[in-house]
Image (cartoon, grey):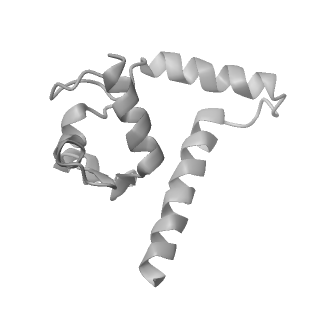
Amino acid sequence: MGLRYRHVMEDLENGTIRVAIRLEPQFDVGKKAAGYTFLGLGSVALLKECIKESIVEPKLDGRLIARSYYGVWAAVHRAGRKAELDPKIQTCHGFRKYFENARTKRTLTMRRR
């Protein structure tokens, strides 16, 4: 939820195909360190569309996710209920871990090439 335009500005404005998300040092500490993340063609196209439609402001502190933490939390939990998931499942934790694991697998695959 802390992603800002400044984190992607350099590559996005240079026209780089894969945009690196450059986070400040405080994101790289502890057990939940962010690691290295990139946006691919599809994500970059969606981001540019959001900028064009004024959903994301191309300012240094413009939020890339134009929703509050609570709004995202509520949507994920509502989706879990609609999908009739076991109420014991921690939906937000599982959702985050799914993407974290997908990113890790992709990174390992890219390193093998």
| 75 relative to 100 in the view: left or right | right
Q: Position of residue 38 (x, y in %)?
A: 36, 54
Tell whether 21 sits left or right of 42.
left
Q: Is residue 69 above or below residue 36?
A: above
Res 1 seen here: no
> Residue 78, image x and y in percent?
69, 19
Residue 73 image offset from top left, x and y in percent = 55, 23
Splitting the image into 4 quarters, where does residue 1 fall? top left
Looking at the image, is 68 positioned above or below residue 34? above
Q: Residue furthest bottom?
A: 112
The residue drawn where x is 36% and y is 55% is 37
Across the whole image, how many numbered discs are drawn on residues? 0
Q: Residue at x 26, y 32 (%)?
A: 4
Q: Which quadrant of the structure image shows residue 18?
A: bottom left
For residue 59, what is the image quadrant? top left
Left or right? Give the position of 11 relative to 74.
left
Residue at 51 percent across and 66 percent down: it is: 106
Residue 100 shows in this picture? yes
Asked whether, in this view, residue 80 is left or right of residue 9, the answer is right
